[in-house]
Amino acid sequence: MPLPNDARPRLESSGGAAGGHDGIPPIWGRVVLALGLACYAGLLALGSSRPGPRLWGIHLAAYLPEHQRLMFWLSLLAALVLVGLGTLTGFRQITQQTTQPPKVPTSPLGPWKLPAFLGLYGLLLWALRTRTQFLGDGSLWLSRLQAGELLEGHEPLAAAVWVGAANALRAAGSDITGSAMAPLSVFCGLGAAAISWGIARHLAETSRLFIWSLTLITTMGIAQLFFGYIESYPPVAVGVLAFLYTGLRSIRRSSSPLLPGVVLAGAIASHLACIYLVPAYAYLTVRSGQSLRKLSLYALLVLALATSLLLALGYGPNRMIETLRVATIGVESRGDLPAPPRDARPYSIASWDHLLDLGNEVLLVIPVPLLLLCGSLATRFSSVRVTPDPRRMFLGVSAASGLAIASLLILPVAPAQDWDLFSLFLIPTGILGIYLGLPLLCGHGGRLVGVGTMILSLSTLASFVLVNADRNAGVDRFETLVGPDAKITPFARTYAYEILVYYHRHQGNPESARRYAEALLLGEPTNPRIWAMVGTIHYSQGDFKGAIPYLEQALARGRDATGTLTNLAICYAHESRGQEALSLFKLAAAKEPDRPDYQVNLALGLFSVGHSDSARDLLARTIQRWPRYEPALRALRRHSLPRGADP
């Protein structure tokens, strides 16, 4: 399917998106691309040689298994060689004074290729899905979905999608596990891939450039969101891509900005961070040449539709104010305070540390588009007279808005954990870099440069995906990101350690769980929930004597949850402190009288202090209320037998 003329970047000497000049390939842009790639490879080598928490965007290779690490470095070397050869070939063309670029045939793209591409892409998304859910708030989202709790955040529509999927699984009688919820993000990935197909058609001139554009878009680091990622961002990323696609489509067809406005309203309802796309929509509306009255109607339409969706999802003014408060948190630590505020960053916006985090984010999410963007800028500054290009302007406004928000946004959690939110702001920049960098893939040597950039993009995404698809590698990296050497807030470290506690407990590794729980206790010694957590871990290991001091401290500090009461009572019972155990069993049963297990615990406590008649009477009442509750039946049979009989 040949691409339409008005969707093609111009290759003539007057400029345009391609940036050629008198038939000579953009050689200086390729030189910058090759040098940038060499510097990037050096940074990757530096980050992987000392994998610490500060270089979290470039240390991924260090956590890969040995054979995967070898493949990564070989792929990186191949990319360096191919881009270098392509650059030298361009120099040779100049010395031979070739004045016309080679003709690149445009082969039709059959209708079967999109389904085939989506099928292959979907299989990869599922096969290499993340296994740990440490990225972002995946563990928190999964636990709340399992508990059926309402997800109150800043992403009402995206949260509604996840809750709907969890409810569907629950109605079907299926357990809500990471593997059961992962298909939703895979489906989002298929939608994003289909949209990326459309975006690539609006960027590329030939089928060869189309394939390269599509590959580079779908292998940006943002694609990690679609590998079984459980959080709001997979649907939101689809919304951002859909807005960019409909915007490019509107420019190509010179149509009204009605459809981009509707898509933008949906994106904002999915996550309020998508407000950063409003300036790009304003550019579309002004460029459409409509009357002032129609422009006002378009603006009101987006506002009304987004507001209606938010209100329908229960996102009222109070939650909007809370979102604004979170987005504007920027409290700096002061040396005269004993400890920084719990939700403050350990450094300010205008600091090298903040710049380092932004650099890590860019190198993690859009390394190849960044290199292409730098090469394109070098070409333009060296030899090209730029002509107006509405696609470039539209993507440029979107990219500038996203970069501005990413540079100013302050959040309390570790930046490496919040990479997903910041990646949303970098999607337009990535697509802009690919669009402007397409001329570097044209002319003599362009095929070599194109293949080299494709290999580079695939290998960088693979390093990100494979680390998270390997359970051990994912755990090792996350423990590094939030370890003692990480420059993060107390809140961020506490939050991360809690995730590690629950993870290790779930994996049957109580020693590691206890280590992180005790580290939590050192950081928050007045928190009764953490005292209860440490005590419960001791209890689960059968260390009843060791659990008692922690559980007693939890109760003394106000932790009166029935689980804590019951655990402490059982520990007392094992230590022959029957009367103390009985009093706690009574409290737990009184707090939750509809729990048959608490009634059985109370009956067993009565037996332990010699109140056998009261215990049997309680068991009989429990069985009458829950006739098939086996623990109660078994306890009554055992304690009704004559002494010495076999139960």
Image (cartoon, grey):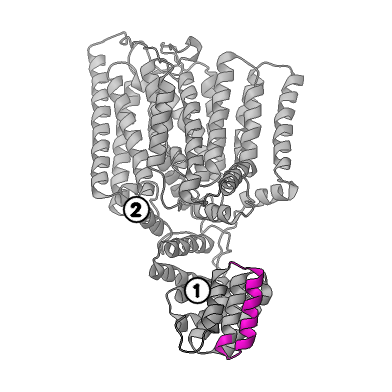
- Residue 374 visible within the image: no
In the rendered image, residue 364 lying in the magenta stretch gets the answer no
The crowd level at tag 1 (other Cα within 10 Å; few <14, some 14-19, many 20+) is: many
Residue occupying the far bottom of the picture: 610
Q: Considering the numbered disc 1 on the image, is that residue within a helix, a strand or a loop?
A: helix
Residue occupying the far right of the picture: 293
Give residue 165's mark.
none
Return the residue at label 2.
473
Chain-order first, disc 2 or disc 1: 2
Return the residue at label 1.
536
Task: Point out residue 522 in the picture as x, y percentages from the top left corner.
Answer: 48, 73
Question: Nearer the observer, disc 2 or disc 1?
Answer: 1
Left or right of 542? Residue 311 is: right
Task: Point out residue 533 in the picture as x, y percentages from the top left corner.
Answer: 51, 71
Question: Relative to 378, is 410 above or below?
Answer: below
Task: Point out residue 58 in the picture as x, y percentages from the top left corner.
Answer: 36, 46
**Among the 4 quarters of the image, the one containing residue 302:** top right
Left or right of 41? Residue 594 is: right
- Tell me the kind of residue under disc 2: Ala
Residue name at image x 71 percent, y 25 percent: 298
- Residue 217 visible within the image: yes
**Among the 4 quarters of the image, the one containing residue 260:** top right
Task: Point out residue 204 in the picture as x, y percentages from the top left corner.
Answer: 43, 19
Left or right of 15? Residue 246 is: right
Q: Considering the numbered disc 2 on the image, is that residue within a helix, a strand or a loop?
A: helix
In the rendered image, residue 624 lying in the magenta stretch gets the answer yes
Span shown in magenta: 607-628
- Marks 2 and 1, how far apart in space? 28 Å
Q: Main secondary structure of the magenta part?
A: helix
- Tell me the kind of residue under disc 1: Thr
Residue name at image x 30 percent, y 26 percent: 451
Dividing the image into 4 quarters, which one contains the N terminus?
Answer: top left
